[in-house]
Image (cartoon, rainbow, N blue to C red):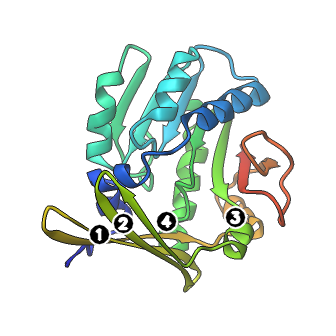
Amino acid sequence: MKMITKDWFASWFDTSFYHILYQHRNDDEAQYFMRNLIAFLDLKPHQTILDLACGRGRHSVFLNKLGFNVKGLDLSKNSILYAKPFENLHLKFSVHDMRKPLNNSYDAIFNLFTSFGYFDNDQDDIQVLKNIKNGLKPKGVAVIDFMNVHVVKQHLVAKEDKTLNGILFNITRQIKDGFIVKNISFSSEGKDYQFQERVKCLSLEKIKSYLKTADLTLKHTFGNYKLDAYDLETSTRLILVVS
């Protein structure tokens, strides 16, 4: 079996298999979230937005269609190559590790779809927040769209099989060493593969401690893409607005 040994996010996100497994992501829901967020933040067309950890750019492309100047950054070279054809004068994509400083400043920085809490060392996660802080314009605002780990733990599916594009994905999930761990194994064209996703079980209080260290102020918390109030027991998401 081909076992990947480097950082899970650097290997898994850069494969075509990742996009096969998650091909059914709800674009309508994502666009609904973006419209709600833009209205709440009162962002105006032609302001600058950074989509940090943009993947293949689905949020970036939509935000650009709404009239914003958008930069999409992601560690995955293959995802950025996929996004590049969508570029125009006001939409650009580049490869970037979010632990590295940002080269420009923005009116808003979005970190969406649980693109935070990947690193073993807390200091790496805090450095991401410091980079966000330093990448904001004086009146800029950032949004971190994280999961509600309390609800995820309560409803964790230990084992699941999915067949997509003729590939049978065997998925197991567990809580281990403070991380929600998803193991993904499958075979394709005669080769066996095994990948892993690891996201920290970050409570609101833990994230608040990160924010304090990064000199960021928590302004609002929401519990779903409708921007309803966050509730520990029922909310599907933990969405933080910071500056």
User: Nearer the N terminus, badge 1 or badge 2?
Assistant: 2
Residue 141 percent across, percent down from the top left: 68, 37
| Residue 186 circle label | 1
Give me the C-alpha separation between circle 4 and circle 1.
23 Å
Kindly indicate whether the residue at mark 2 contacts the one at mark 1 (C-beta within 8 angstroms): yes
Q: Identify the residue at horizontal 29%, vertical 62% (top origin).
A: 11
Q: Secondary structure at mark 1?
A: strand
| Mark 4 or mark 1, whichever is nearer to me | 1
Distance between mark 1 and mark 2 Cα atoms: 5 Å
Task: Report the residue at 24% width, 71% height from top.
Answer: 193
Real-space Cα separation, disc 3 to disc 1, in angstroms? 34 Å
Rendered image: mark on residue 105: none
Report which quarter residue 154 is drawn in: bottom right
User: For residue 207, which numbered disc appears in the image?
Assistant: 3
Going by the numbered disc 2, the residue's amino acid type is Phe
Q: Which badge, 2 or 4, is on the more N-terminal residue?
A: 4
SS label for mark 2: strand
**Alpha carbons under labels 3 and 4: distance apart:** 13 Å
Q: Counting residues from the N terminus, which is met first, the one under dot 4 or under dot 1?
A: 4
Tell me whether circle 3 and circle 4 mark residues in contact (CB < 8 Å): no
Tell which circle, 3 or 1, labels the residue nearer the N-terminal end: 1
The type of residue carrying mark 3 is: Ile
What residue sits right under mark 4 in the picture? Answer: 118
Residue 59 in the image: state x and y as whole percent: 52, 33
Quadrant for the N terminus in the image:
bottom left
